[in-house]
Amino acid sequence: MLKLENISLKIDGNSLFSKLNLEVKAGQVTTVMGPSGCGKSTLLRMIAGLESVDTGTIEFADRTLDNLPSHERKLGILFQDDLLFPHLSVGENLAFALPAKIKHQERRDQIEQALEEIELSGMYERDPASLSGGQRARVALMRTLLAQPEALLLDEPFSKLDQELRGRFRKQVFAYAVKNQLPTLLVTHDPADAKAAGGDILSL
């Protein structure tokens, strides 16, 4: 379970939210909605350890995360921007996320299977700069999943996909979360995303 207790956030002395309490159970997708600038994305960054918490406590799997660096939190975060490594090929970007224990041909096989799942078969050697925005978004999404996170933080993850792909990959991500029993926190402006998530909705 991912648990937030009495979390507050101030920017330039202005309180965006205070005493925020939230529980996201294993396999549950909770959606955070609200206008731009209300602190939704910053909330995810706080949970991931990329921003400091003003007050309150963040717990995950019976551990307090407040003083843990981001790489020890075992959380997968997907931002609005894809943040692919420009000096690596598409396949190498995906390989970066795989656990080191996966070696050689098995590593390549898993990447090729992942490319097939996101409908980018044969693009292992492609330069990320040559991809469309939607293709880059799919690679970033799969890279997050290949890292085998224990919880998911999703910041407008489907916004750059066209309507048809958006529905398919949204379904894929939520099914992955349920199958692997991952607490998942989704930030979105799109009511359709929230409806598809099927869980609780928090308005900021």
Image (cartoon, rainbow, N blue to C red):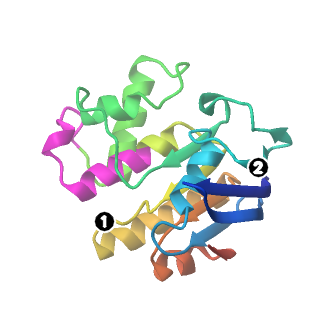
Say the numbered circle drawn on residue 55.
2
Amino acid type at image mark 1: Leu
Image coordinates for residue 87, horizontal then vertical, percent: 23, 26
Give the residues in magenta.
122-142
Main SS, magenta region, reads: helix
Amino acid type at image mark 2: Thr
Say the numbered circle drawn on residue 180.
none
**Residue at mark 1:** 161
**In the image, which is nearer the foreground, mark 1 or mark 2?**
2
Image coordinates for residue 35, horizontal then vertical, percent: 49, 75
Task: Give left or right: position of 143 versus 195.
Answer: left
The first of marks 1 and 2 along the sequence is 2
Which element carries disc 2, helix, strand or loop?
strand
Residue lying at 71% horizontally and 60% vertically, measured from the top left:
27
**Residue 103 in sight in this render:** yes
Residue farthest left in this picture: 130
For the C terminus, give its image quadrant.
bottom right
Residue 126 covered by magenta stretch: yes
Image coordinates for residue 51, horizontal then vertical, percent: 58, 42
